[in-house]
Image (cartoon, rainbow, N blue to C red):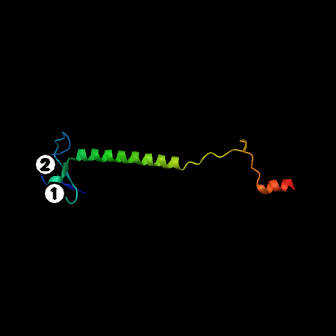
């Protein structure tokens, strides 16, 4: 995809904006009719929206990564632990 200065005199094609287009967005390997002509104001709004979306995705990824790396709470010394089971060797040793 390429962003170039508009070579011809055309109007912005976004919504009801009718300012003079300064830039042309041309996807690669398509015909001349597939180009989008935009003015500086509309292009800057698109860029701002993209940056905002990108920042939100980054914050969500960071939050989900932080939640995945949380460690489970460890037992404190005040918390009683479960009684240990006796092994067969310990049971045999007590019988003798």
On residue 90, which mark appears? none
Q: Name the residue located 52 percent from the left edge and 49 percent from the top edge.
A: 68
**How many numbered dots are placed on residues in this image?**
2
Residue 70 % position (x, y): 56, 48
* Residue reaching furthest to the left: 9
Instruction: From the top left corner, tell me how far across and down residue 15 is, in percent.
Output: 20, 41
| Horizontal side, residue 8 vs residue 84: left or right | left
Q: Is residue 22 visible?
A: no
At label 1, counting other C-alpha atoms closer than 10 Å, the crowd grade (few under 14, some 14-19, many 20 or more) is few
* Residue 31 drawn at (x, y percent): 16, 57
Which quadrant holds the N terminus? bottom left
Q: Secondary structure at mark 1?
A: loop
Q: Which residue is mark 2?
A: 10
Q: Which residue, given by chain and number where applicable, does mark 1 sit on? A: 31
The residue under the point 19% across, 50% down is 36
Q: Is residue 63 above or below residue 2?
A: above
Res. 61 visible in picture: yes
Residue 8 in the figure: left or right of residue 79: left
Local crowd at mark 2 within 10 Å, few (<14), some, or many (≥20)?
A: some
Q: Position of residue 94 (x, y in %)?
A: 85, 53
Q: Is residue 90 left or right of residue 35?
A: right
Q: Say whether disc 2 or disc 1 marks the residue closer to the N-terminus.
A: 2
Q: Where, by quadrant of the figure, is residue 77 drawn? A: top right
């Amino acid at each position: 995809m390429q962003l170039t200065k508009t070579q011809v005199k055309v109007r912005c094609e976004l919504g009801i904006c009718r300012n003079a287009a300064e830039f042309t967005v041309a996807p690669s390997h398509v015909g001349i009719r597939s180009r989008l002509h935009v003015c500086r104001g509309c292009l800057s709004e698109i860029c701002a929206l993209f940056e905002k979306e990108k920042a939100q995705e980054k914050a969500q990824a960071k939050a989900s990564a932080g939640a995945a790396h949380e460690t489970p709470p460890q037992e404190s010394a005040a918390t009683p632990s479960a009684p240990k089971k006796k092994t067969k060797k310990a049971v045999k040793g007590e019988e003798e």
